Image (cartoon, grey):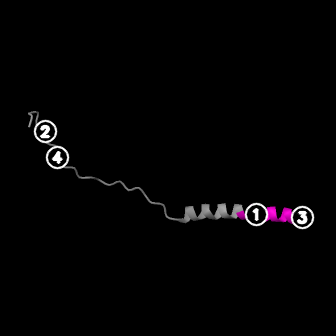
Amino acid sequence: MDTNLLMIGVAVMLGLIGVAASRDLLRRLRPQPRLVPIRVERPARRPRDTSGM
């Protein structure tokens, strides 16, 4: 009976390792979003009025 429990334990451990490895591989194969610099056109700043409204 100990041999059966040992084999079940080994199978569970191998299954968990397989799941972790497949998740890691899928994460690496999925294209990662690239950060592309975008130039933003800003309107020219106008000097602020110092007089009250």
Element type where label 2 sits in the image: loop
Residue corresponding to mark 3: 3
Q: Of callouts 3 and 4, which one flags the residue occurring earlier in the amino acid sequence? A: 3
Residue corresponding to mark 1: 12
Q: With 15 as the anchor, is 51 left or right in this view?
A: left
Quadrant of the image occupied by residue 6: bottom right
Between 4 and 15, which is closer to the camera in this rendering?
A: 4
Q: CA distance from mark 4 to mark 2?
A: 10 Å
Q: Residue at x 41, y 55 (%)?
A: 35
How many neighbours does mark 1 have within 10 angstroms: few (below 14), some (14-19), or many (20 or more)?
few
Mark 4 is on which residue type?
Answer: Ala
Residue corresponding to mark 4: 44
Q: Residue at x 10, y 37 (%)?
A: 49
Mark 1 is on which residue type?
Answer: Val
Q: Of callouts 3 and 1, which one flags the residue occurring earlier in the amino acid sequence? A: 3
Image: 11 above or below 41: below
Q: Residue at x 22, y 50 (%)?
A: 42
Please report the bounds of the magenta region as a residue range.
1-15
Mark closer to the observer (1, 2): 1
Residue corresponding to mark 2: 47
Magenta-span inclusion, residue 13: yes
Q: With 41 as the anchor, is 1 left or right in this view?
A: right
